[in-house]
Image: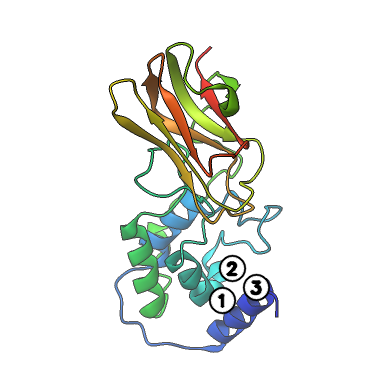
């Protein structure tokens, strides 16, 4: 049985159940804001995902499946390990957001009052503009021949084994964690933009695990 068929089964079961309401968390007040911010770019009519979550009526049958996906951190697809680099285009859920979704589902997934529902988002709007940059292949950058202001890292293709760790060692021996992609999801982004640019001095050494990886480029200010 395929993954999406199994989720459809879960959704069908959830849609038939009438669970008692045991939570104060509601779709209109808390959960819709999380979904709008993190999920609607794909989960909308015409989006990459197979179902829309734009409204309560669309999302409610999927409540148990949504809970399973976010608890396992499969959705939203991000793949970069938390705390290993800080990225401005991070779409992954915080621990609080995951906890709220789980408690909302376990508490009967109530809708709430329409007055609290935020305006529907514009799925085509980007929260930030990607900074101007040029690509430097990592295979050519050990050690760095000049000081570089790194604004992000781009994967030219998914990691061969689903995992890739990139760090930089400065000449003084200090380490800078750049990116750790683990269990790469096919819908995860290929470009990861740092919240604050990382300045690496001349002589810094880029280290990759696995060492023979060739999928990544540094994105540096021109």
Is 13 or 212 nearer to us in this picture? 212
Q: Position of residue 213 (x, y in %)?
A: 59, 39
Please say if 17 is above or below 107: below
The figure's colour scheme reads rainbow
Left or right of 175: which side holds 159? right
Task: Give the Cα distance between marks 2 and 3.
Answer: 19 Å
Task: Give the Cα distance between marks 3 and 1.
Answer: 17 Å
Please say if 222 is above or below 216: above
Is 115 or 153 nearer to us in this picture? 153
Q: Position of residue 46 (x, y in %)?
A: 71, 53
Q: Which residue is mark 1?
A: 61
Is 73 or 178 nearer to us in this picture? 178
Q: Which residue is mark 3?
A: 3
- Nearer the N terminus, badge 3 or badge 1? 3
Tags 2 and 3 touching, CB below 8 Å = no
- Nearer the N terminus, badge 2 or badge 3? 3
Q: Write the residue at 46% across / 11% down.
A: 146
The kind of secondary structure element at disc 3 is helix
User: Which quadrant of the structure image shows residue 176?
Assistant: top left
Tags 2 and 1 touching, CB below 8 Å = yes
The image's mark for residue 95 is: none
Question: How many numbered discs?
Answer: 3
Q: Write the residue at 46% across / 71% down.
A: 67
Left or right of 149: which side holds 172? left
Q: Write the residue at 66% across / 41% down.
A: 157
Q: Position of residue 80 (x, y in %)?
A: 47, 47
Is 157 or 125 nearer to us in this picture? 157
Please say if 168 is above or below 133: below
Q: Write the residue at 43% across / 52% down.
A: 118
Q: Position of residue 120 (x, y in %)?
A: 52, 50
Q: Which residue is mark 2?
A: 58
The kind of secondary structure element at disc 1 is helix
């Amino acid at each position: 049985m395929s993954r999406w068929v199994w989720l459809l089964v879960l959704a069908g079961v959830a849609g038939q159940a009438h669970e008692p309401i045991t939570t104060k968390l509601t779709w209109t007040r808390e959960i819709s804001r999380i979904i709008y911010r993190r999920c609607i770019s794909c989960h909308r009519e015409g989006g990459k995902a197979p179902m829309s979550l734009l409204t309560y009526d669309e999302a409610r049958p999927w409540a148990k499946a949504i809970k399973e996906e976010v608890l396992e951190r499969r959705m939203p697809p991000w793949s970069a390990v938390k705390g290993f680099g800080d990225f401005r285009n991070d779409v992954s859920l915080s621990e609080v957001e995951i906890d709220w979704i789980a408690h909302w589902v376990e508490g009967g997934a109530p809708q709430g009052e329409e007055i609290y529902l935020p305006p529907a988002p514009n799925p085509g709007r980007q929260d930030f503009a990607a900074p101007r940059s040029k690509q430097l292949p990592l295979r050519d950058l050990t050690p760095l021949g000049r000081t570089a202001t790194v604004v992000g890292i781009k994967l030219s293709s998914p990691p061969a084994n689903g995992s890739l760790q990139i760090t930089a060692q400065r000449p003084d021996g200090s380490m800078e964690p750049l990116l750790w992609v683990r269990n790469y999801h096919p819908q995860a982004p290929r470009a990861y933009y740092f919240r604050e640019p990382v300045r690496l001095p001349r002589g810094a050494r880029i280290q990759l695990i696995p060492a023979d990886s060739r999928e990544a480029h540094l994105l540096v200010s021109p």
